[in-house]
Image (spheres, rainbow, N blue to C red):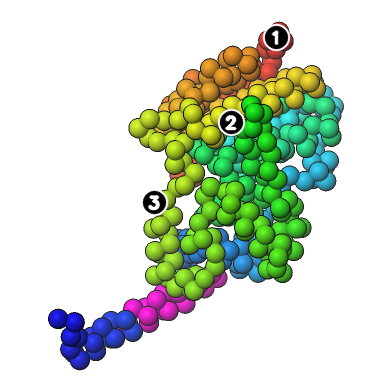
């Protein structure tokens, strides 16, 4: 026992050598910009670490437009329409993610008298939307505020950046982490809050970036050193495939928040924070004389779960809302595109419902 023959050792060395050679060959063949098979290239690149993907973006080896998206930036917000355009009678400010903006854009196509002021982020959770609304409100006076909540982002209320929830295409934009303290929202701001600060921190790789990583490790529920940090694994196709498998089977944001069997846990901290976010956003709208409408957007397979967990809170607070479950089924895969967004007919149904709601008189204030 414990004795390894010379032949066995030689075989093991040959196997490891061939694996290493295959690893190098596949890595070379499917390196960014070299392969003529982009699908396979993306497959082998998926498991690259968050920092590794960011390095490619910054260097220009990967599409870097996502670096610019989602930042809560007053200068950018000031460039948006602040009053209704000529021939328009409504300025609609919308906060959310692409699902929200797709619906609002389509509603404006159906009703040419709407002027839109759109501020969102890729896959943005309600925490991003609330901070954007609070930042944007003093810069304009809207007639209507549309606030979109996507069911798959509820767990991400325990995140602080698009870096970790969007592992395949990490977006570095940041937003606060909210917690309930004595029935009110307590806000922890990210240490990096602008694209310029991110580029400077990531370029220098010094103390500001390390402090931000420590903050994510402490305050972002989804932070995982194995998937976030750049290492030798990024240079190995086998290592990247292992990381890809790890990410596919570990979604820390939904733990304790959502399950396919039971839906959302009404007592989960993220759900309780979401309820308070909607209450405080509605209060801000009322204080400014702005109509407030929430869109409850169910992602594929979520049925009416978001509506179920929020209905009582919205009704008791007299918050106006539209839920997609009343328009089409999120359990019907034909209502979704391959990328997870709604197909045109589903988005049209939501847009028509929003247009009709905005053209109805607002409910009397309580």
Where residue 12 sits: x, y (%)? 26, 83
**Is residue 22 within the magenta segment?**
yes
First in sequence, mark 1 or 3: give its number.
Answer: 3
Query: Mark 2 against mark 3, which lies toward the viewer?
Result: 2
When the figure is inspected, residue 25 is found, relative to residue 303, above or below; the finding is below
Q: Disc 1 and disc 3: Cα gap in Å? A: 46 Å
Write down the residue under mark 3: 249
Q: Is residue 364 magenta?
A: no
Which residue position is annotated with label 2? Answer: 274
Residue 127 image point, x, y percent: 64, 37
Q: Which mark is residue 366?
A: 1
Q: Which residues are magenta?
A: 18-34
Residue at 57 percent across and 49 percent down: it is 220
How far is the residue under mark 1 from the one under mark 2?
A: 22 Å
- The residue positioned 63% from the left and 16% from the top of the image is 317
Q: Quadrant of residue 332?
A: top left
Looking at the image, residue 38 lies above or below residue 266: below
Which quadrant of the view contains residue 355? top right
Task: Residue 129: give x, y in percent of width and height.
Answer: 67, 36
Q: Residues within 10 Å of mark 3 (few under 14, many from 20)?
A: few
**Of residues 321 and 193, the one drawn nearer to the viewer in this rendering:** 193
Is residue 62 visible from the viewing direction of this image?
no
The first of marks 2 and 3 along the sequence is 3
User: Disc 1 vs disc 2: Cβ atoms closer than 8 Å?
Assistant: no
Res. 315 mark: none
């Amino acid at each position: 026992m414990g004795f390894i023959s010379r032949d066995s050792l030689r075989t093991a060395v040959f196997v490891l050598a061939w694996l290493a050679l295959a690893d190098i060959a596949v890595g070379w063949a499917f390196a960014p910009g070299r392969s003529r098979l982009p699908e396979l290239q993306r497959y082998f690149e998926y498991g690259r670490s968050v920092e590794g993907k960011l390095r490619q973006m910054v260097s220009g080896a990967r599409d870097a437009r996502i670096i610019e998206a989602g930042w809560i930036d007053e200068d950018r917000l000031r460039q948006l329409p602040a009053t209704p355009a000529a021939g328009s009678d409504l300025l609609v400010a919308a906060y959310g993610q692409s699902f929200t903006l797709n619906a609002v854009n389509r509603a404006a196509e159906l009703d040419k008298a709407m002027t839109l002021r759109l501020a969102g982020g890729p896959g943005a959770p309600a925490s991003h939307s609330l901070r954007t609304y609070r930042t944007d409100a003093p810069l304009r006076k809207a007639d209507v505020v549309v606030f979109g909540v996507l069911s798959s982002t509820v767990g991400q209320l325990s995140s602080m950046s698009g870096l970790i929830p969007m592992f395949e295409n990490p977006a570095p934009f940041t937003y606060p982490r909210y917690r309930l303290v004595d029935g009110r929202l307590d806000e922890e701001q990210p240490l990096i809050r602008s694209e310029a600060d991110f580029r400077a921190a990531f370029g220098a790789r010094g103390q500001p970036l390390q402090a931000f990583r420590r903050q994510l490790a402490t305050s972002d529920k989804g932070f995982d050193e194995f998937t976030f940090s750049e290492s030798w694994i990024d240079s190995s196709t086998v290592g990247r495939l292992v990381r890809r498998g790890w990410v596919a089977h570990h979604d820390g944001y939904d733990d304790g928040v959502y399950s396919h069997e039971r839906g959302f846990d009404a007592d989960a901290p993220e759900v309780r924070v979401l309820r308070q976010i909607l209450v405080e956003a509605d209060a801000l709208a009322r204080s400014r004389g702005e109509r407030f409408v929430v869109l409850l957007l169910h992602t594929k397979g979520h049925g009416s779960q978001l509506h179920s967990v929020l209905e009582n809170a919205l009704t008791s607070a007299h918050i106006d809302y539209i839920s997609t479950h009343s328009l089409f089924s999120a359990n019907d895969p034909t209502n979704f595109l391959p990328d997870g967004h709604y197909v045109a007919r589903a988005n049209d149904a939501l847009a028509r419902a929003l247009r009709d709601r905005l053209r109805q008189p607002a409910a009397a204030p309580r």
